[in-house]
């Protein structure tokens, strides 16, 4: 059984890799920082295609179909890790 903190770490590392944010470390990504922002407060993700890449890679890692992810899951690291945690532990 994966712990939620392991999942959060994986998500942060994957976000850095997919978005090519080499100047960031996983520790610099706050768990509740919005993935998508507004003009005044931009989020971490600026490219909607990155969401598809993230969903695909997360799906491969945790055996979750990309279509199982919804918009609310991609609010921030907390919401995404919670969805993954629930999906992988529901199968146990």
Image: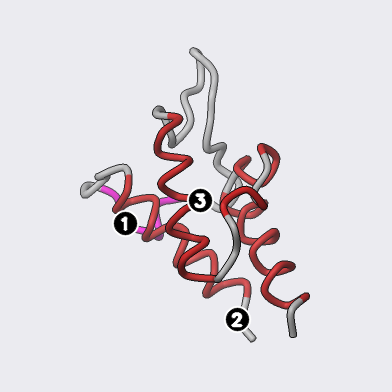
Task: From this view, report whether residue 32 is shown above or below residue 92.
Answer: above
Identify which residue is drawn at 69% across, 59% down. 83
Q: Secondary structure at mark 3?
A: helix
**Magenta region: which residues?**
24-29
- Sequence-wise, which precedes: disc 2 or disc 3? 2
Label 3: how many residues lie within 10 Å, few (<14), some (14-19) or many (20+)?
many
Picture quarter with the N terminus: bottom right
Q: CA distance from mark 2 to mark 3?
A: 18 Å
Residue 6 placement (x, y as % from top left): 52, 75
* Residue 27 falls within the magenta-colored stretch: yes
Mark 2 residue crowding within 10 angstroms, few (<14) / some (14–19) / many (20+): few
Image coords of residue 92 (percent x, y): 74, 85
Camera-near label (1 vs 2) is 2
Q: Which residue is mark 1?
A: 25
The residue beneath circle 3 is 55
Residue, far right:
90
Q: Residue at x 66, y 37 (%)?
A: 71
Is residue 36 found left or right of 18 in the rendered image?
A: right
| Left or right of 25 on screen, residue 11 | right
Residue at disc 1, secondary structure: loop
Q: CA distance from mark 3 to mark 1?
A: 21 Å
Mark 2 lies on a secondary structure that is loop
């Amino acid at each position: 059984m994966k712990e939620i903190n392991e999942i959060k770490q994986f998500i942060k590392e994957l976000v850095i890799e997919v978005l090519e944010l080499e100047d960031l470390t996983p520790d610099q990504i706050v768990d509740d920082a919005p993935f998508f922002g507004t003009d005044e407060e931009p989020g971490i993700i600026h490219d909607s295609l990155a969401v598809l890449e993230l969903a695909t890679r997360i799906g491969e890692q945790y055996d979750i179909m990309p279509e199982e992810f919804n918009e609310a899951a991609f609010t921030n690291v907390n919401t995404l890790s919670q969805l993954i945690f629930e999906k992988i532990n529901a199968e146990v």
